[in-house]
Amino acid sequence: MQDDLIAQRVAVLEAQYDALRAELHAANEKLDTLLRITAMGRGAWMALMKVGGVFAVFAGAAAWLWDHFR
């Protein structure tokens, strides 16, 4: 009787363990996706800042030329 109860409890624990592992695996996949999206966003932000910097240099040069030769 005691062995059956122990076996039943172990079976329940194993089922719960398997369910937790599946949930953890799904959460890890979601986290990997979020990290990939974040990395793409960071790269896009840096590219935008570089383009903006180049634009600011050209705008500053144009303003200097305008002021200097006016």
Image (cartoon, rainbow, N blue to C red):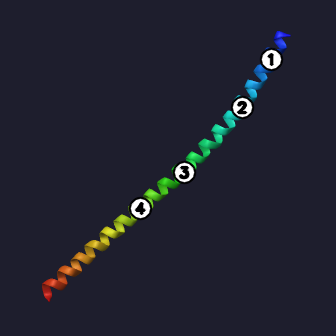
Q: CA distance from mark 3 to mark 1?
A: 41 Å
- Give the labeled residue for mark 3: 34
Q: Is residue 63 left or right of residue 40?
A: left
Instruction: Judge whether 7 appears above or below 45 on screen.
Output: above
Q: Which of pointers 4 and 2 lies earlier in the amino acid sequence?
A: 2
Mark 1 crowdedness (10 Å alpha carbons): few <14, some 14-19, many ≥20: few
Kind of element beneath mark 3: helix
Q: Is residue 66 left or right of residue 54?
A: left
Kind of element beneath mark 4: helix
Q: Residue drawn 52% across and 55% down? A: 37
Residue 18: which numbered mark, if any?
2
Q: Which of pointers 4 and 1 lies earlier in the amino acid sequence?
A: 1
What's the amino acid at mark 2?
A: Asp
Q: CA distance from mark 2 to mark 3?
A: 24 Å
- Give the labeled residue for mark 1: 7
Mark 4 crowdedness (10 Å alpha carbons): few <14, some 14-19, many ≥20: few
Q: Position of residue 48 (x, y in %)?
A: 39, 66
Q: CA distance from mark 2 to mark 1?
A: 16 Å
Kind of element beneath mark 1: helix
Q: CA distance from mark 4 to mark 2?
A: 41 Å
Kind of element beneath mark 2: helix
Instruction: Judge whether 26 appears above or below 60 on screen.
Output: above
The quarter holding residue 66 reads bottom left
